[in-house]
Amino acid sequence: MTQRTTFLLFCFCLLFSVHELPAQYFIWGQDPGSLKWRQILTPNFRILFPDDYEEQAAYIADLLEYSYDHVGNSLGHRPRRVPVILHNHTVVANGFVGWAPARLEMFCNPPQNLDGHDWIESLAVHEFRHVVQLDKLNQGLTRVLTCLLGEQATGIVTGLYLPMWFLEGDAVSAETGLTHGGRGRIPSFEQGLRAQVLEKGKYTFEKATLGSIKDYVPDHYELGYQIVANARATYGMEVWDHVVGHVARKPHTLTAFNKGLSNSTGLSKTALYRSTMEHLDSVWVLQKSRADYTESVFVDPGNDIYTNYRYPVFIDSDRLLALKNALDDIPRVIGIDMNGGEEVLFTPGILNPHAISTNGRLVVWSEQRTDPRWEHRSWSEIHRFDLVTGKKEKLTRRTRYFAPAISPDGSKIAVAEVTAGNAYSLVVIDAATGQPLRRIATPGNDFLMTPSWHSDGHTLLAVALGEEGKRIVVSSGDDDGFVAVFYAGRTEISRPRFVSSETILFNGAFSGVDNIYALHLPTGEVVQVVSSPFGAVDADVSPDGTTLVWSDYSSMGYRIAGGKADGGGRRPLDDVEDHSHRLYEVLAAQEGGVVTRSRIPRKEYLSIPYNKIAGLFNVHSWAPFSVDADNLEGRPGLSVMSQSPLSTSVVMLGYDYDMLEQQGRIFADVSYTGLYPVLKMRFESGTRESFYRDRDGRQVTFPWRENVLRLGASVPLRFQRGAYLMGLQPSLNSSITKVLRTADSPSFFRRNEYTSLDYRLFAYFQHRMVPRDLRPRLGLVLDINYRHTPFRNGGDMGSVMAGRALAYLPGLSRHHSIRLNASWQQRKPGNEAKQTINYSYGNAVNYPRGITSRSDDKATVLTADYAMPLFYPDWRIGPVFYIKRFSMNVFYDHAAVSYTLREENRETETRNETLHSYGMDLMSQLHLLRFFAPFNMGVRVMFPSTHDAPKFQFLWTINF
């Protein structure tokens, strides 16, 4: 590949390179503007947090400082100080590292499927490992690039060379080796890849790393962990230190990652992938052969596409409730009889999984609801559904309740509560009103998960997580304490439930595979009830006590399996053997330490108020050219970028040189999102070039100055209800444009000024989508816009009023889509001033495809599209192309327009005209050069009424 191609790739990644999430200056969202913030400065971190999180922030400061001495060891790097932003007003359990500007953001609410280690500690280790990865790149040639480009240089090198499977696999390896938990210790984390390899075979490197729309492909966390950790086990802890160092020093070559890997292992990344899969295949075949498995029958009818049936629970002896989701559909709660007959009962919203509970009449679950304006404020609210009346309703509002369990008599619901300050308890609420009745916590604030009721309607069961691991605890209705009935320690257990007055069923990983275990309370005896090759979880027993059902995993997803509740083959826990590939033991030995509370020394760091105003300007990057990321353009000039640590203000300053006019301009682009309305401002000032014809007809060019000030305010609101997403965004924008003389402007040239106002209301309502959908199955978009120049002290641009209604309807088959569009526009011309520059409004509607350069007084446009997927090939053409999908779209566009002919010394004349076009798009979704983001590329053939021959257009977009 040529050096020019390499340079173009660098420029491309400059626009779209960032760790973990695909935008250069990524902003996930904002916290409520009313929050007061504080900060703690430690030797290696600057920690920002809301003022109601003081106690936890102090511990996180100690945690991060302790982690600093351990997390970077296997990469041989100690990074520079980085800001850490703590978000505690959201129920999202996540974190990310951005680079440009550099920061680590932690979302502090733990999930209900947490493994055997504290959430905050595991999250800190994982995310700080990303900081180590990226900061280690700041050496060699990458350091020189950083001097030229700022922090975005690291983003360029990361996007070009460090694959997502490495970034996440390495972080999961650190999380696993440095804690008592970590995903690498959990059988469910590898079960997708293990089932695929053993039942479907090994995928190509491209399919394994870039995914598929046709088949389920384990994500880059699961695959990356196996590649990265196995390489550490085979070649030593320092193997990835050498690879990242080589990339940092030699990013000018396109094969920097491969070369560094080859120097360390003798293998390319594709060869390392194949070697890892061959090794795992042999290990997993042996593991599978050394266990006995439970005989069972499947209740569900089976599917030819990857589908999961989770949390099966009996409604009555002949009917089950389950959560179903698939590659081709969003999650639904279904009823299914023992013969496999299904019906959709209801569609939940953004589900907080890990528990759906019923007593045979009422179904309860929790949904995440995000504040319409503030993305970092959300709640987990309890919903219920009446199986008899079909009524669905929200029971609690603005709560942080998870994993609800309804009592046998339907009068109470037990939930796990996580406060904004990370206080954990079980709460019993009234099933009719949602009001709390009692709250039960542990003395040490152990994390409590997935409660369940005893048949007596008083006793509660849950999993408690403390520093010593997991245990099953019981609380009677007579006191507020918990009694431990089973200690699992570091072994993963989850979702215990009473199935009789003396028996508890729960998920356990004692065999190295998730399976079903039973605890007999009077004796304390634990036996394995179900043994599955890839995982059996979430068991329930029929009301008559004869039938046991569970979710059983295979390469096609979880199916509902069943057998006799008193079936044989039960094995005492002491006889259960773990034959798994315990890769985590190698990682733990290499790391030689554990990040856990009892080992972390407590220090006193000063907490001071954080001034949000003082933090508005935070310059992180610059470039010797002007970047227009919205239009994928880079032009000669200069740019400086700033983004505040809380991501409330983004500023870009620069100079832009227009090659066509050979003139330059300065600009300042500012947006502020810390208030309820989003505020934006852009100022431009520069010299433009135009021409006039002299008396001899010669074209004479001349310069003039243009100053533009644009101000805008909008309120972006987003809502969600069931299967539908909704949004509403009113906005008001204004601009003042001044046309000024320069010393070289002709004497007749006059100044001019325009003041424009733009009012817009944008709203949408659409069905949630799955990866196979080309467009929403159902949806409606309304867009109303009015622009005018109300003040007559300057130039007059006239006005334009436009409206658009867009409807999405289902086609003849699943994932087919009909799109209907009706647009209308009316323009009123302004009064042109002579001997100066005049402006006019552009079109606010799209004309029939293939018809351009129209400017009509009125236009009514109707369009119809029918889009359908053709097939999903998963083709690879060397390392250049990996094609996931081919699709087709046929369209017909019709427009009725009217315009006015204006000629000197003649009356004006209004004419009407009909325009149309039809055609077809043939599209492919593909990855180029193994770049993580897919391209949509194809060709459009159009037959517009204004042309005698067909027109062709190359189409492409990139999906981040």
Image (cartoon, grey):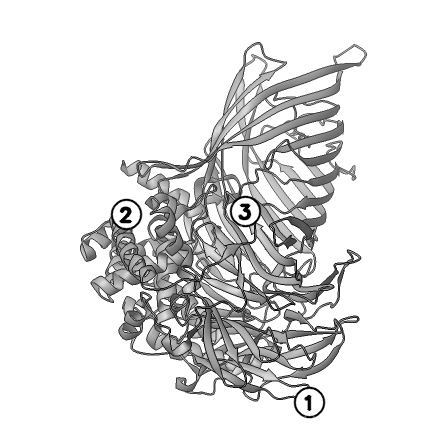
- Using the image, determine if residue 586 lies above or below residue 390: below
Going by the image, does 248 lie left or right of 95? left
Q: Is residue 238 left or right of residue 54?
A: left
Foreground: disc 1 or disc 3: 1
In the rendered structure, find residue 667 and report the number of the disc placed on it.
Answer: 3
Closer to the camera in the image, 428 or 293: 293
Decide if residue 629 is on the left or right side of residue 347: left
Secondary element at tag 1: loop
The CA distance from mark 1 to mark 3 is: 70 Å
| Disc 3 residue type (three-letter) | Phe
Spot occupied by residue 216 in the image (x, y as percentages of width and height): 46, 48
Residue 478 is marked as 1
Say above or below: 419 vs 75.
below
Q: Disc 2 marks which residue? A: 270
Query: At which x and y percent is residue 489?
Result: 43, 80
Labels 1 and 2: the sequence-earlier one: 2
Percent across and percent down for residue 490 are: 41, 77
